[in-house]
Amino acid sequence: MRTRTLVLALAVAALVPTSAFAQQGGGQGGMGRGGMGGQGMAGLMAARNLVEQGNVAFLAGRSEMQLTAEQSAALRVIAERWDAETKEAREQVRPLLPQPGQAGPGGMGGGDRQAMMQRFQEMAGVIQKLVEDDRKAVDEAMKHLNETQQATARRLLEERNQPRRPGA
């Protein structure tokens, strides 16, 4: 189980671009090398988060963003469009990723490592497209935010995609 989770985490991390959420501000304070690409579990966390909720919807729901009514409406539109456009892909990927408290990835061929790797390879393109589509949605959302809000958004996304330690 532990080997399957590690292999999946490393494979997902390779797919999730290290600069996915650091497009604004030259990567400072964003998901740079120490972020998603530098840690397998962080990449796994980011992929699982996207399956559950896109990053724009996540930001739109955070009070720290201090959005105006107009900004909130704009982000909701972007989030809803992303949600509709990626629904099928997220449903395909969901069984691939471990859920909180789950020892290993579901739907990966049981204890058969070869079957697990084949299943992941089949889904790799879907995961990559999901990540790219989310990055585009985040880039679009950033255009509606001021500099302070953009910095807050980068910080929140970085925190969202960091692995959490048990009991923390």
Image (spheres, rainbow, N blue to C red):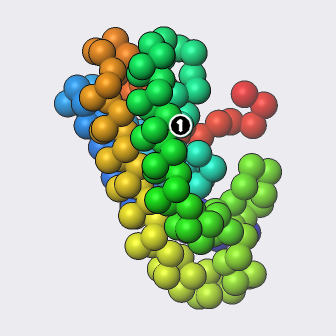
Q: Position of residue 84 (x, y in %)?
A: 52, 56
Q: Position of residue 100 (x, y in %)?
A: 74, 49
* Residue nearest the observer in this picture, 75 or 99: 75
Label 1 sits on a secondary structure element that is helix
Q: Residue at x 56, y 61 (%)?
A: 87
Q: Amino acid at mark 1?
A: Ala
Q: Residue 149, can we see it? A: yes
Quadrant hosting residue 168: top right
| Residue 114 vertical position relative to residue 132 in the rendered view, above or below | below
Residues packed near mark 1 inside 10 Å, few (<14), some (14 to 19) or many (20 plus): many
- Is residue 138 toward the left or the right of residue 42 in the image? left
* Residue nearest the observer in this picture, 1 or 74: 74
* Residue nearest the observer in this picture, 130 or 43: 130
- Is residue 66 toward the left or the right of residue 115 in the image? left
- Is residue 20 toward the left or the right of residue 108 in the image? left
Which residue is denoted by mark 1 in the rendering? 57
Q: Residue at x 37, y 44 (%)?
A: 137
For the N terminus, the image quarter is bottom right
| Residue 99 vertical position relative to residue 140 in the rendered view, above or below | below
Q: Residue 93, can we see it? A: no
Q: Position of residue 167 (x, y in %)?
A: 78, 31
